[in-house]
Image (tube, coloured by chain):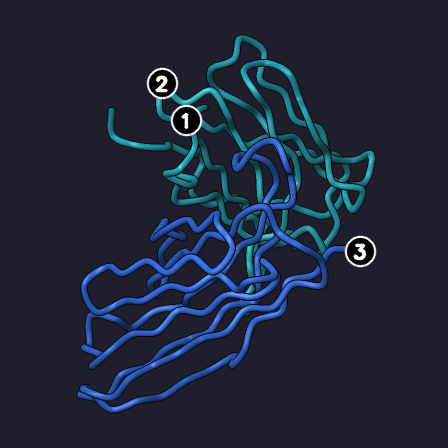
Amino acid sequence: GQQVMQIPQYQHVQEGEDFTTYCNSSTTLSNIQWYKQRPGGHPVFLIQLVKSGEVKKQKRLTFQFGEAKKNSSLHITATQTTDVGTYFCAGGVDRGSTLGRLYFGRGTQLTVWP
Amino acid sequence: DTGVSQNPRHKITKRGQNVTFRCDPISEHNRLYWYRQTLGQGPEFLTYFQNEAQLEKSRLLSDRFSAERPKGSFSTLEIQRTEQGDSAMYLCASSLGTGGRGYTFGSGTRLTVV
């Protein structure tokens, strides 16, 4: 069945260091989405990638979608304490829509030391 | 509109009892999703609706689970004969038909089966 694997499960960094989380799918995805969940909170949408090889930036966050549309990454430059939380990738497989069911990875829990 | 609203926030029930949760999506969103999340895991798909039509239901979902969205607005998720393994956070999300902006999640209903 469809699986989305995400590594690492945990990452501890000192403030100012960079952080990267990786996501891999067993099958080709129609789109990949990234969400952030703060401790005790609910997932909050960050971005959606649709095109092969797509790269998008949001301030210190850089998102990539692989050429084969099977992998993705999120890179945070110079982490801050406000970046603390769990980052999830979520892949969709519906060819005609980006709004169907999503397969979530297990998430990467980021801790930032001040 | 203040976002996706879920009620109750917490529910403690005895094994074997039935429970029902409610979700009020963002009013202009035509898609509504139910996910379940346990500690240390990503959200797991249960079902989703477009307007009042239930478009997909997870095969992982047993017959004890049923969801409705009778008028294409709010939705209810019912679990019959609850089991301890049903203990989880039940998340509702909604999205706009044009896509591109991902899901908006509610704060969830935390179910504890004792």
Residue B58 placement (x, y as % from top left)? 74, 40
Determine contact: label 3, label 1, CB under 8 Å.
no
Which kind of residue does numbered mark 2 sit on? Glu
Q: Chain A's shade in the image?
A: blue
Residue placed most toward the observer, B43 or B50: B50
- Between disc 2 and disc 3, the foreground one is 3
Determine contact: label 1, label 2, CB under 8 Å.
yes
Viewed as shown, does residue A14 lie left or right of A10?
left
From the image, tell me which residue sits under label 1. Answer: B96
Rendered image quadrant of residue B53: top right
Residue A114, above or below A25: below
Rendered image quadrant of residue A86: bottom left
Instruction: Please tell me which residue is depicted at 57% across the width and 56% down the height of the picture.
Output: A104
Badge 3 density bin: few <14, some 14–19, many ≥20, Cα 10 Å: few
Q: CA distance from mark 2 to mark 3?
A: 33 Å
Residue B73 placement (x, y as % from top left)? 47, 15
| Outermost residue, top side | B71
Viewed as shown, does residue A110 lie left or right of A58?
right
Mark earlier in primary sequence (1, 2): 2
Question: Which element type, helix, strand or loop, lies under badge 3?
Answer: loop
From the image, tell me which residue sits under label 3. Answer: A1
- Between disc 1 and disc 2, the foreground one is 1
